Image: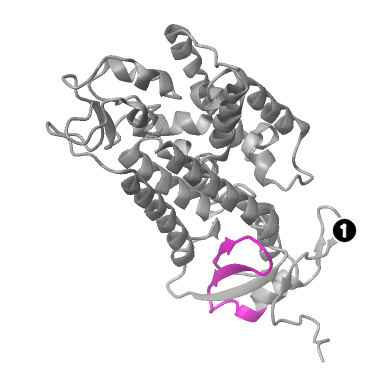
């Protein structure tokens, strides 16, 4: 079981690295914690923070479903920070460095820090509309391709986690991770759990010593702790693991628990992630929505492919040109739905055909705008695919 989990961890880490550095993918849009940061703004306004997308919400939903079924298996099998922290600790043990034992009361007190981190991150994210955690996020240091928006603090935090992992078992995951704080309430009600058969147990304590989350497996009838990551280390080291009368069984609850294999866990992981990817492709909800005025009885829409519509800020700028007050002004009801992203991005404008036209919409986006308030010309940063505003194309 240990070897299988290491392979799964390595596979997901390799997938992340390949997607970021070889394919050039936008891995931040597949971060479940990005969904946590984006959820309030999207529900309240219909808009997402720059650099995030609907995929963040889908992957968050997938991880929550996964957690309700398997507890915090995402942390134990898919999180790159958790995997690297475990591997550092394993390497330290091979060098003869044993992890420090943290007293249980202190461990419980430290575990509350992740809720403080979560509250601080969400407060400043919702207040500023920016990803304030990004400047300190060890995961972002891995997936950012070391761009201009990465700060030295992300590397400092990453180095601190690596250093702490030499002497402590997964300290960030146990005490500081805001995603762990988000998942814990769902994990508490997770379906799968390790159950201990008291009549077969030798009370050797191997299971508790092997648990990376410091759960006293040898003292409980069933592991319902929210911090359980379903690593199954406890099951794999149990000396009473014979099929006829095992001391530890992992699976659904019940008076006569039926053991699940680790293959079940892998199938659920892949099904949840595959579902998120499929939903993102098939149900592409807009990540920016803005409406003006009251809708008329009859409206039409025009779908535009736009170069330069890369983020929420640019979507707001698009709205600025649509609400201009010069000769290219758009009277009537206007609703904008946009899918900012790599060029060309997509925007859909809904308008009242009685007072304006699709051509007028294109002109408003493409024509320079004289801002009387600032007494200056503003040139549009957008280009519409297949549209030549000045008729210069041959």
Mark 1 is surrounded, within 10 Å at the Cα level, by few (under 14), some (14 to 19) or many (20 or more) other residues, namely few
Q: Nearer the viewer, residue 49 or 55?
A: 55
Judge whether residue 130 can be spotted in this image: no
Q: Which residues are magenta?
A: 332-359
Q: Which residue in the rendered view is the most extreme toward the right?
A: 376
**Would residue 25 be found to the left or right of residue 175 on screen?**
right
Q: Is residue 289 above or below residue 204?
A: below
Q: From the image, which quarter does the N terminus lie in? A: top left
Q: Which residue is nearer to you in this view: 333 or 155?
A: 155
In the picture as drawn, the residue positioned furthest to the bottom comes out as 394
Residue 341: in magenta span: yes
Quarter of the image where one finds residue 127: top right
Q: Which residue is painted at 54% across and 36% down in the image?
A: 83
Tag 1 residue? 376
Q: Which quarter shows the C terminus?
A: bottom right
In the displayed structure, does residue 130 sit left or right of residue 58?
A: right
Q: Residue at x 47, y 18 (%)?
A: 111
Find residue 124 and report its image quarter: top right
Quick check: is 356 in the magenta stretch?
Answer: yes
- SS category of the residue bearing label 1: strand
Residue 193: horizontal and vertical position, in percent? 28, 32
């Amino acid at each position: 079981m240990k070897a299988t989990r290491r392979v799964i961890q390595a596979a997901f880490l390799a997938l992340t690295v390949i997607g970021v550095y070889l394919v050039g993918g936008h891995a931040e849009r597949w971060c479940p914690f990005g969904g946590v940061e984006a959820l309030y703004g999207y529900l309240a306004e219909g808009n997402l923070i720059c650099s995030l997308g609907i995929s963040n919400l889908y992957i968050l939903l997938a991880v929550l479903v996964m957690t309700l079924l398997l507890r915090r298996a995402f942390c134990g099998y898919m999180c790159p920070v958790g995997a690297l922290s475990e591997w550092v600790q394993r390497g330290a043990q091979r060098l003869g460095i044993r992890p420090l034992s943290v007293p249980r009361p202190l461990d419980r007190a430290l575990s509350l820090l992740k809720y403080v981190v979560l509250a601080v991150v969400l407060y400043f994210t919702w207040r500023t509309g920016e990803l304030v955690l990004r400047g300190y996020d060890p995961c972002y240091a891995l997936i950012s391709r070391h761009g201009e928006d990465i700060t030295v603090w992300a590397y400092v935090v990453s180095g601190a986690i690596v250093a702490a992992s030499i002497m402590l078992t997964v300290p960030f995951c146990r005490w500081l991770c805001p995603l762990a704080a988000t998942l814990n309430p769902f994990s508490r009600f997770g379906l799968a759990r390790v159950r201990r058969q008291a009549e077969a147990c030798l009370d050797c304590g191997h299971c508790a010593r092997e648990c990376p989350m410091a759960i006293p497996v040898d003292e409980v009838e069933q592991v319902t702790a929210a911090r359980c990551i379903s690593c199954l280390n406890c099951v794999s080291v149990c000396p009473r693991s014979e099929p006829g009368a095992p001391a530890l069984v992992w699976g659904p609850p019940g008076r006569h628990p039926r053991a699940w294999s680790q293959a079940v866990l892998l199938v659920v992981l892949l099904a949840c992630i595959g579902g998120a990817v499929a939903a993102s492709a098939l149900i592409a909800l807009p990540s920016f929505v803005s409406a003006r005025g009251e809708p008329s009885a009859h409206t039409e829409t025009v779908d535009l492919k736009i170069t330069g519509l890369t983020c929420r800020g640019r979507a707001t700028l698009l709205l600025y040109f649509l609400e201009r007050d010069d000769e290219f002004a758009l009277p009537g009801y206007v609703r904008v739905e946009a899918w900012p992203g790599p060029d060309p991005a997509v925007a859909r404008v809904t308008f009242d055909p009685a007072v304006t036209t699709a051509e007028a919409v294109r002109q408003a986006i493409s024509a320079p705008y004289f801002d009387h308030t600032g007494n200056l010309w503003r040139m549009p940063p957008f280009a519409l695919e297949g549209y030549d505003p000045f008729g210069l194309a041959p």
